[in-house]
């Protein structure tokens, strides 16, 4: 999903696909990947030069390997002098604890995975930043994983996260709603449960067929309804909608919000007031003329996202229309730059960072996770909306 806005930054680790044995020694050094060099067929290959393991530290400190394991594991039942000697030996040899293997045995820090189709746009960055802040405060690592919209890559990532014993997986952003998608997610839930992990929906609603999977989302429907009501209060009776067709959680909810807002405010309702556009500026620019060039064009538009709204700006200006004198426009997301448009864009603001915070807290068991979380939105009014032209 492309976006004209800058990506937000957060401290994360990239997610890679690879197999890790669940019988790994928690204190072993992970060997370099790739084919064995030298040695007979079937051998493990030569020892990696410079690799230091727990037994090396034990020999250097003059203690048993079990004692080194207790010291590096933080056990308090070790003689202070012995502890000092072991830590000095580890530092001198450059020994690094295999944190991944320790996590796999339940003795180390486990990661949280942030899994989305594309890591693009400030909305995902803000959500990830919220989740990362909670992870960092509690000694965890946040992994960013992208599927690029491919189900097979999603399966591979989930399998790897199971092998690495991730504490939780946050599925982020709009998703499918059909039976096959629900069955696929149910499989992920089962696989993660076998390693003591959990799955949460983040920035998307729950699925009816999976009531046990918690959701942390914001009020798409209420946000769009507030936008429609704002326009109705300004005297607009014909309000159009530009957004993606049904088939995903986010498009479905926002279109529902528009239709409910039109009905509740007694506005004109007809199929010709809805134009389909995916979430890009170019799509907004392409679809908006379908409404503006109609015999009965609307006097205002509600757009599914700020991206689409920027495209609507372009289309309106290409036709010599003034905003808001000739056409009022409302977006959704409150991206950082839309206030700098001319005029500034009136838009719905979701609490993206808080969504990430709440999801991470539930994932780590820091707050109650027995019910879904639905956060409210707010309408930021700027110069792109005004009274209907007489």
Image: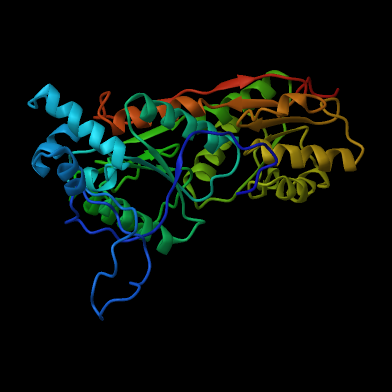
* Residue 182 visible in the current orientation: no
Looking at this view, is 223 or 138 the one in front?
Answer: 138
* Residue 343 visible in the current orientation: yes
- The furthest residue to the right: 320
Image: 380 above or below 92: above
Q: Could you tell me which residue is drawn at 80 percent across and 37 percent down?
A: 313
Image check: 251 left or right of 38? right
Q: Position of residue 326 (x, y in %)?
A: 85, 30
Q: Could you tell me which residue is drawn at 89 percent across and 43 percent down?
A: 318
Looking at this view, is 133 or 306 the one in front?
Answer: 133
Image check: 114 left or right of 310? left
Looking at this view, is 230 or 99 the one in front?
Answer: 99
Image: 259 above or below 40: above
The C terminus, quarter of image: top right
Q: Position of residue 288 (x, y in %)?
A: 76, 45
Q: Could you tell me which residue is drawn at 65 percent across and 47 percent down?
A: 271
Q: Position of residue 90 (x, y in %)?
A: 26, 38
Q: Position of residue 125 (x, y in %)?
A: 54, 35
Image check: 254 left or right of 211? right
């Amino acid at each position: 999903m492309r976006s004209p806005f800058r990506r937000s930054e957060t401290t994360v680790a990239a997610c890679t696909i690879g197999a890790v044995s669940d019988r790994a020694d928690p204190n072993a050094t992970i060997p370099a990947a790739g084919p064995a060099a030298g040695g007979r067929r079937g051998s493990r290959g030569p020892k990696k030069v410079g690799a230091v393991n727990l037994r090396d530290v034990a020999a250097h400190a003059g203690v048993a390997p079990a004692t080194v394991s207790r010291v590096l594991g933080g056990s308090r039942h070790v003689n202070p002098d012995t502890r000092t000697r072991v830590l000095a030996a580890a530092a001198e040899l450059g020994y690094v604890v295999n944190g991944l293997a320790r996590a796999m045995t339940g003795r180390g820090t486990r990661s949280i995975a942030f899994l989305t189709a594309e890591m693009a746009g400030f909305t995902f960055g803000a959500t990830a930043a919220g989740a990362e802040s909670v992870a960092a405060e509690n000694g965890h690592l946040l992994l960013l994983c992208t599927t690029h919209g491919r189900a097979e890559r999603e399966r591979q990532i989930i399998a790897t996260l199971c092998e690495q014993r991730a504490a939780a997986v946050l599925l982020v952003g709009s998703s499918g709603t059909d039976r096959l998608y629900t069955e696929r997610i149910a499989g992920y839930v089962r696989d993660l449960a076998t390693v003591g992990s959990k799955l949460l929906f983040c920035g998307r609603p729950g699925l009816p067929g999976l009531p046990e999977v918690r959701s942390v989302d914001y009020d798409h429907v209420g946000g769009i309804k507030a936008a429609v009501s704002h326009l109705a209060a300004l005297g607009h009776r014909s309000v159009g909608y530009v957004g993606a067709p049904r088939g995903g959680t986010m498009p479905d909810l926002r279109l529902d919000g528009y239709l409910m807002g039109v009905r509740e405010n007694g506005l004109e309702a007809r199929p010709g007031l809805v134009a389909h556009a995916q979430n890009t500026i170019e799509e907004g620019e392409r679809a908006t003329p379908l409404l503006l060039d109609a015999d009965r064009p609307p006097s205002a538009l509600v757009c599914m996202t700020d991206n689409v709204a920027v495209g609507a700006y372009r289309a309106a200006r290409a036709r010599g229309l003034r905003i808001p004198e000739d056409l009022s426009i409302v977006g959704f997301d409150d991206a950082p730059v839309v206030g700098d448009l001319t005029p500034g864009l009136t838009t719905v603001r979701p609490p993206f960072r808080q969504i990430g915070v709440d999801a991470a807290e539930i994932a780590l068991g820091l707050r109650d996770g027995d019910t879904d979380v639905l956060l409210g939105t707010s309408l930021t009014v700027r110069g792109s909306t005004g009274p209907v032209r007489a």
